[in-house]
Amino acid sequence: MDEHGWMNRGSPLYSYTYTDEANCFPKFDPLFLAGQTVKGAKALIEGKRGIKAALCREGLNNFDEGPLVMEELINGRAMLERNRLDKRLIILGTIGNNAPFIGLLGTVMGIIRAFHDLSQATTQGPQTVMAGISEALIATAVGLFVAIPAVVFYNYFKARQKGIVDGAYATANVLMAFAKRKHAGESKADKSE
């Protein structure tokens, strides 16, 4: 047991391990506090990148403020980090959502042009319309060709982001559990005196 009495080796939480998805550092265990002081835990994550490290750093820097303050600060940091991760996904989502409309606009304009050409042509008739419509449908195909991969990649990265954020929250929740245990132990010690 460490100096704060947060956990012992018999605890089911003690054997829990979690590998950081972003591989920011090897085997980043949310229970890294086992046998560590808060200062020692801060040293373990110092200079590490990624959302898990950011949330843990926020929690550890405010560990002595109590679990409620720590939880609010971690949630605030998580919102900032999630916004940072969303920053470029917005561009991919916008491309995926709007490319079919641009293709449709090209199709409509092409059909309008085809009918205009038909009205001007006196001898060719259907051939004029068909040539214009085939050109117009190319715009639709290009729009879909751009949109489909963009939506697939957007969904892939959004799911990956959700996994990373959920993993970071899980890690932060374990850290908050340590803080609650520490502060509950201090409260019991204060009451017994």
Image (cartoon, rainbow, N blue to C red):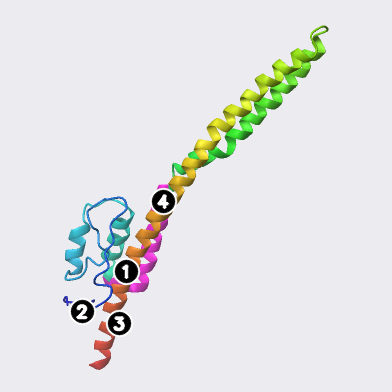
Q: What residue is pinned by disc 4? A: 161
Q: Residue at x 34, y 73 (%)?
A: 67
Say which of marks 4 and 3 sits in front. 4
The three-letter code of the residue at mark 3 reads: Ala
In this rendered view, identify the residue nearer to me: 63 or 179. 179
Magenta includes 160?
no
What is the C-alpha distance between the residues marked 4 and 1? 20 Å
Considering only order in the chain, which callout, 2 or 1, is on the residue closer to the N terminus? 2
**Label 1 vs label 2: CA separation?**
15 Å
Residue at the (44%, 41%) spot, across then down = 88
Between label 3 and label 2, give the one nearer the viewer: 2
Q: Disc 4 residue type?
A: Gln
The disc, 4 or 3, on the residue closer to the chain's N-terminal end is 4
List the residue tagged with mark 1. Answer: 174
Disc 2 marks a residue whose amino acid type is: Gly
Residue under circle 2?
5
Location of the C terminus by quadrant is bottom left
